[in-house]
Amino acid sequence: MTTLITGAAGFVGSRLAKALLDRGETVVGIDNFDPYYARAHKERHLRDLLAEPRFTFIEADLRDAEGMLAIFKEHRPGRVAHMAAMAAVRYSMQHPLVYGAVNVQGTMNLLDAARQTSLPACVLASTGSVYGTSTPVPFKEDAPADRPLAPYPASKRAMELMAHCYAHLWKLPTTVVRFFNVYGPHGRPDMMPWQWTLDILAGKPLTLYNAGRMKRDWTYIDDIVAGLRLALDHAPASGYEIFNLGCSNPVENLRFVEVLEGLLGKKATLVDTATPPTEPLITYADTGKAHKLLGYTPKVQIEEGLAKFIRWMREEKIV
């Protein structure tokens, strides 16, 4: 069975493709090399994929509805892992329209192509940011998630709701997975672990909100990929489900910095500033549902995960 992965040249999409290929599956990957960050990083992600005979890569854009339909008609995937998106909360404040075009309309183009062809089981990547600040912690999937703080989580929540319509009306089997603060090797260069590593080494100050007391549920990439594989393997024949994929262990930003300092052998210069309106004080996934129904059990804590990340940064000569 063929799995179609969108965002296959991105952080999570490329690592999922590698995991599926490693267990003998056939993967069709699509990506549009959006210039949000340098193409060279995405080419690095693809480096261990392109030589695989069971991997087909197509440069394509979700916003091209006809192009999406043509890909589905040609490859007839049995499963879809939709990882492509415009991410980054703060960037979405400056460019809100592209989030609607890519994350909402682009996802609709994908779902409609699936509806018109093979009705594959679809696993859609969403975000723990949809919970905002009005949800009791730990965040559970049955929370309304109706008060997003920025265009990015708002677009992801809209994507979730539109996917529910496709599952309800056209019986397109759909699983939504909400990621929590993913990090690790192949991470995006705009993400906090990458930026803070470079800033500490360069002696640049780190800006911490709320005196560094904000907490994030940092989830290592291997745990996220394991959760995605489980979601694909347990995809229902019909219906709609939402699962949190997190570590369920929120860590203060100060502690995160301390771990980085130890790994880099250099102290950070910290600057405290007011918390912007896009940032919740805590992200915290309740993963009980994913554990019960999928068997999901995150294993990597930040001490181990950041050590692997820094090792990868050094191996790639990024630091």
Image (tube, rainbow, N blue to C red):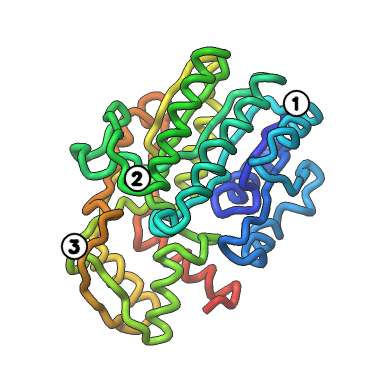
* Residue 172, x across and y down, in percent: 57, 18
* Residue 117, x across and y down, in percent: 72, 20
* Residue 123, x across and y down, in percent: 54, 31
Kindly identify the amino acid type of the residue bearing the numbered disc 1: Arg
Q: Earlier in the sequence, mark 1 or mark 3?
A: 1
**What residue is rendered at 75% in x and 26% in y?**
76
- Report which residue position mark 1 lands on: 76
Kindly identify the amino acid type of the residue bearing the numbered disc 3: Arg
Element on which disc 3 rests: loop
Q: CA distance from mark 2 to mark 3?
A: 18 Å
* Classed neighbour count for the residue bearing mark 3: other residues with Cα under 10 Å, few (<14), some (14–19), many (≥20): some
Q: Quadrant of residue 35?
A: bottom right
Question: Quick one: which residue is furthest to the bottom in this view?
Answer: 203
* Classed neighbour count for the residue bearing mark 2: other residues with Cα under 10 Å, few (<14), some (14–19), many (≥20): many
* Residue 143, x across and y down, in percent: 27, 30
- Report which residue position mark 2 lands on: 129
Element on which disc 2 rests: helix
Q: CA distance from mark 1 to mark 3?
A: 48 Å
Q: CA distance from mark 2 to mark 1?
A: 32 Å
Q: Are marks 1 and 3 in contact (CB under 8 Å)?
A: no
33 or 231, nearer to the observer: 33
Q: Is residue 259 above or below residue 49?
A: below
Q: Quadrant of residue 214?
A: bottom left
Q: How many marks?
A: 3
**What residue is rendered at 34% in x and 40% in y?**
130
Disc on res. 213: 3
Kindly identify the amino acid type of the residue bearing the numbered disc 2: Ser
Q: Which quadrant of the figure contains the N terminus? A: top right
Closer to viewer: mark 2 or mark 3? 2
